[in-house]
Image (cartoon, grey):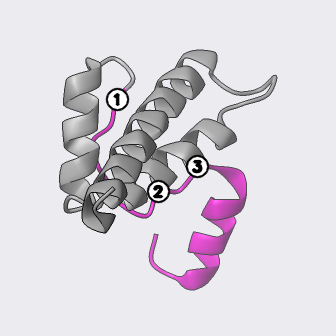
Protein backbone atom coordinates (compact mmCIF):
# COMPACT_ATOMS: atom_id res chain seq x y z
CA UNK A 1 0.00 0.00 0.00
CA UNK A 2 2.21 2.77 -1.24
CA UNK A 3 0.37 5.35 -3.26
CA UNK A 4 -2.38 7.72 -2.21
CA UNK A 5 -4.67 6.20 -4.83
CA UNK A 6 -4.25 2.75 -3.29
CA UNK A 7 -4.95 4.17 0.17
CA UNK A 8 -8.16 5.87 -0.99
CA UNK A 9 -9.30 2.65 -2.68
CA UNK A 10 -8.57 0.73 0.52
CA UNK A 11 -10.48 3.22 2.67
CA UNK A 12 -13.58 2.95 0.52
CA UNK A 13 -13.82 -0.80 0.92
CA UNK A 14 -12.69 -1.54 4.46
CA UNK A 15 -12.08 0.08 7.80
CA UNK A 16 -8.54 1.44 7.71
CA UNK A 17 -7.44 2.33 11.23
CA UNK A 18 -5.23 5.36 11.66
CA UNK A 19 -3.20 3.51 14.28
CA UNK A 20 -2.36 -0.18 14.40
CA UNK A 21 -3.16 -1.13 17.98
CA UNK A 22 -3.31 -4.91 17.87
CA UNK A 23 -6.94 -4.84 19.06
CA UNK A 24 -8.56 -8.28 18.77
CA UNK A 25 -12.09 -9.17 19.71
CA UNK A 26 -10.83 -12.47 21.17
CA UNK A 27 -8.73 -10.68 23.82
CA UNK A 28 -10.16 -9.88 27.26
CA UNK A 29 -11.42 -6.31 27.72
CA UNK A 30 -8.47 -5.26 29.89
CA UNK A 31 -5.95 -6.39 27.27
CA UNK A 32 -7.87 -4.80 24.37
CA UNK A 33 -8.13 -1.49 26.19
CA UNK A 34 -4.48 -1.48 27.24
CA UNK A 35 -3.37 -2.09 23.65
CA UNK A 36 -5.57 0.70 22.28
CA UNK A 37 -4.50 3.17 24.94
CA UNK A 38 -0.83 2.38 24.34
CA UNK A 39 -1.25 2.84 20.57
CA UNK A 40 -2.88 6.23 21.15
CA UNK A 41 -0.19 7.27 23.65
CA UNK A 42 -2.63 7.65 26.52
CA UNK A 43 -5.08 9.87 24.63
CA UNK A 44 -8.46 8.67 25.90
CA UNK A 45 -10.53 10.67 23.44
CA UNK A 46 -8.56 9.44 20.43
CA UNK A 47 -8.85 5.85 21.65
CA UNK A 48 -12.60 6.23 22.14
CA UNK A 49 -13.09 7.71 18.68
CA UNK A 50 -11.12 4.94 17.00
CA UNK A 51 -13.20 2.21 18.64
CA UNK A 52 -16.41 4.13 17.92
CA UNK A 53 -15.38 4.25 14.27
CA UNK A 54 -14.74 0.50 14.23
CA UNK A 55 -18.11 -0.17 15.87
CA UNK A 56 -19.91 1.98 13.30
CA UNK A 57 -18.21 0.29 10.35
CA UNK A 58 -19.13 -3.18 11.61
CA UNK A 59 -22.77 -2.41 12.37
CA UNK A 60 -25.56 -3.40 10.05
CA UNK A 61 -26.47 -6.63 8.30
CA UNK A 62 -23.05 -7.18 6.71
CA UNK A 63 -21.06 -6.41 9.87
CA UNK A 64 -19.76 -8.61 12.62
CA UNK A 65 -22.02 -8.26 15.66
CA UNK A 66 -19.41 -9.43 18.17
CA UNK A 67 -16.86 -6.86 16.95
CA UNK A 68 -19.50 -4.12 17.02
CA UNK A 69 -20.50 -4.89 20.61
CA UNK A 70 -16.94 -5.14 21.92
CA UNK A 71 -15.70 -2.06 20.07
CA UNK A 72 -18.70 -0.04 21.28
CA UNK A 73 -18.10 -1.26 24.82
CA UNK A 74 -14.46 -0.17 24.66
CA UNK A 75 -15.45 3.20 23.15
CA UNK A 76 -17.96 3.80 25.95
CA UNK A 77 -15.31 2.89 28.53
CA UNK A 78 -12.82 5.40 27.07
CA UNK A 79 -15.48 8.13 26.75
CA UNK A 80 -16.45 7.62 30.41
CA UNK A 81 -12.82 7.79 31.54
CA UNK A 82 -12.26 10.91 29.39
CA UNK A 83 -15.28 12.69 30.90
CA UNK A 84 -14.09 11.84 34.42
CA UNK A 85 -10.64 13.16 33.54
CA UNK A 86 -12.12 16.43 32.25
CA UNK A 87 -14.20 16.87 35.42
CA UNK A 88 -11.09 16.42 37.57
CA UNK A 89 -9.20 19.00 35.51
CA UNK A 90 -11.98 21.54 35.88
CA UNK A 91 -12.18 20.93 39.60
CA UNK A 92 -15.74 19.65 39.78
Q: CA distance from mark 3 to mark 2?
A: 9 Å
At mark 1, the secondary structure is loop
Q: Earlier in the sequence, mark 3 or mark 1?
A: 1
Name the outermost residue toward the front: 92
At x 55%, y 45%, the residue is: 52
The label on residue 64 is none
At mark 2, the secondary structure is loop
Pinpoint residue 17: horizontal percent, then vertical percent: 47, 56
Q: Nearer the viewer, residue 1 or 79?
A: 79
- The quarter of the picture where the C terminus appears is bottom left
Nearer the observer: mark 3 or 2; the answer is 3
Q: Is residue 44 above or below residue 81?
A: below
Name the outermost residue toward the right: 61
Label 1 crowd (10 A; few <14 / some 14-19 / many >=20): some
At mark 3, the secondary structure is helix
Pinpoint residue 26: horizontal percent, then vertical percent: 33, 17
At x 47%, y 27%, the residue is: 73
Label 3 crowd (10 A; few <14 / some 14-19 / many >=20): some
How many numbered marks does the figure carry? 3
Q: Earlier in the sequence, mark 3 or mark 2?
A: 2
- Please give the range of residues in magenta: 1-24
Label 2 crowd (10 A; few <14 / some 14-19 / many >=20): few
Q: CA distance from mark 3 to mark 1?
A: 15 Å
Pinpoint residue 75: horizontal percent, then vertical percent: 47, 39
Is 81 magenta? The answer is no
Q: CA distance from mark 1 to mark 2?
A: 13 Å
Is 7 magenta? The answer is yes
Q: Are marks 3 and 2 in contact (CB under 8 Å)?
A: yes
At x 26%, y 56%, the residue is: 88
Which residue in the protein does label 3 denote? 53
Which residue in the protein does label 1 denote? 24
The label on residue 17 is 2
Amino acid sequence: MGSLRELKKYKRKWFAPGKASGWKKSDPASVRRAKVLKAHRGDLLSAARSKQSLANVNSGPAGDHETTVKAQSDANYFYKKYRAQQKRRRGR
